[in-house]
Amino acid sequence: MKFAIKLILILAIVLSCKQERTDPFLIQSNQIGQLTDSTQVGELDLVFPNDSVSTFIGGDEFTGKINDIEIYETSGKKLLVLTPFEALDSTSTIKTIRVIDSRFKTPDGISSTSTFGEIRKNYKISGIQNSLRNIIVSVDDINAYFTIDKSELPPNMRYDINLKIDPIQIPDKSKIKDFYIQWY
């Protein structure tokens, strides 16, 4: 009987001490898994301990260009591409995240393989920019923007970069080309 009580007490202590872990693939407005908008470049190895953090340094100090940081799984699959605010600065935070892996999802299930219809159903479209080859759809609720190739649009909308595009003109089945999170 004493053994059973001790066992129950030990289990209760262990279960009460269990830390709640963040979903490593959950996208929120200020967080992607363990990566937050205040994470510094120098902390990336701690945030992604089981993944490879790849930084290309190509003479940024002369050109002023920002170096992207690529995050890979140990299997070699690319997960994310991070762009810091400042190149070659380990204290810089992340400005933009390109979401590559489709396992990264918002609470509403939006991922890099979602369609425009899924985005429109779950979020308020904040703006649409028309560029030469793509349209850029902004969603301020999650600090995100999505590019959609103009080949997904009706033919009469593909070539006029001055055309103002309304969300109802974009076919729901239009596939996302790129999914970005931007932190300010």
Image (tube, grey):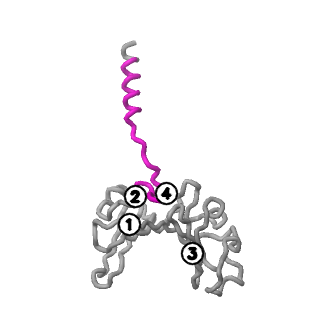
Residue positioned 27% across, 81% down in the render = 61
Q: Earlier in the sequence, mark 4 or mark 1?
A: 4
**What residue is pinned by disc 1?**
94
Q: Quadrant of residue 46?
A: bottom left
User: In the image, which is nearer the foreground, mark 3 or mark 2?
Assistant: 3
Q: Residue at x 38, y 73 (%)?
A: 68
Q: Is residue 181 left or right of residue 58?
A: right
- Local SS, label 2: strand
Category of crowding for the residue at label 3, using alpha-carbon neighbours closer than 10 angstroms: few (below 14), some (14–19), many (at least 20):
some
Q: Residue 44: give x, y in percent of width and height.
A: 34, 61
The disc labelled 2 sits on which kind of residue? Answer: Leu
Q: Which span of residues is magenta-colored?
A: 5-34
* In this view, 39 is above or below 3: below
Query: Which comes before the other along the chain, label 2 or label 1?
Result: 2
Q: Secondary structure at mark 4?
A: strand
Left or right, 34 with respect to 45, comes to: right
Q: Is 107 placed above or below 137 here? A: above
Q: Closer to the N terminus: mark 3 or mark 4?
A: 4
16 vs 156: above or below: above
* Residue type marked 3: Ile
Identify residue for label 3: 136
**Label 3 – label 4 distance at C-alpha:** 20 Å
Placement of the N terminus among the 4 image quadrants = top left
Going from the N terminus, do you reach mark 3 or mark 2 first? 2
Q: Name the residue tied to disc 2.
A: 35
Which amino acid is tagged 4? Gln
Q: CA distance from mark 2 to mark 4?
A: 10 Å
Residue count near mark 2 (Cα–Cα under 10 Å), binned few <14, some 14–19, many ≥20: some
